[in-house]
Amino acid sequence: MANKIKVATTSLAGCFGCHMSFLDIDERLVTLVEHVQFDRSPLTDIEHCSSDCDIGLIEGGVCNSENVHTLREFRKQCKILVAVGACAINGGLPAMRNFIPLEECLAEAYLHGIGVENAHVPNDEELPLLLDKVRPIHEVVKIDYFLPGCPPSADVFWKFLTDLLAGSQPKLDYELVHFD
Ligand code: SF4
């Protein structure tokens, strides 16, 4: 266990589709966990990254203050940080809200939306504040690798991780790379 590569994952302003695609490596997961130990992740019960985490996989862009906090923790603790999927790389579909003032988005969702009752914008101090725009993660911290796709395919995850685990620069063939 001690010499396994530590991999942490998280979903910021993501839909968990990138995580699902990662799990689509199916039975290859068994091979992966022979070499990899999962650290902080929605797949584990670990709340914070270990200080010696090797690889951090980040799904989703940055849409609120908690996302910023989590992303900074990953950057601090992980040697290699990877932007996984369109949302992490360029904000993705959630960044479509960037064309609408935040106040209008909140009003549409919580005040004037269909079926809304007891209309009010949630303001409990426990809730993370939304940023004015959805940001790609490279605008907040340095990113080492980008895995495109919405989501990246299971084969992309597999090739990327097996290259890294073999100690070589990940190389994705043309056929593996897509942006949709
Ligand atoms: S890139 Fe696509 S699959 Fe991944 S979190 Fe964003 S919307 Fe979901």
Image (cartoon, rainbow, N blue to C red):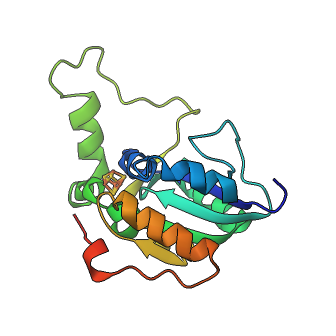
Relative to residue 106, is residue 152 depicted above or below? Answer: below
Q: Is residue 86 left or right of residue 163?
A: left
Residue 76 in the image, given as x and y percentages of width and height:
71, 66
| Place of residue 57 in the rendered image (x, y in percent of width and height, measured from the top left) | 54, 61
Q: Residue at x 66, y 48 (%)?
A: 40
Asked where in the image residue 103 lies, by quadrant, the reply is top left
Coordinates of residue 81 in the picture (x, y in percent):
58, 70
**Which residue is located at x 42 percent, y 55 percent?**
60
Whether residue 107 is visible here, answered yes or no, is yes
User: In the picture shown, does residue 118 fall above or below 1?
Assistant: above
* Image quarter of residue 79: bottom right
* Residue 29 percent coordinates (x, y): 53, 50
Residue at the limit of the structure toward the top, as seen here = 117
Along the viewing direction, whichever of 127 and 81 lies nearer the viewer: 81
Lateral position of residue 7 relative to residue 153, left or right: right
Q: Name the side, left or right, on which 107 lies relative to 87.
A: left
Going by the image, does 103 lie left or right of 4? left
Closer to the camera in the image, 81 or 70: 81
Q: Nearer the viewer, residue 52 or 76?
A: 52
Which residue lies at the image location 42% right of the left edge and 29% below the top edge?
A: 122
Q: Quadrant of the C terminus?
A: bottom left
Confirm whether residue 36 shows in the render: no
Task: Report how many numbered discs are placed on residues in the image.
Answer: 0
- Residue visible at 63% across and 65% down in the picture: 55
Residue at far right of view: 2
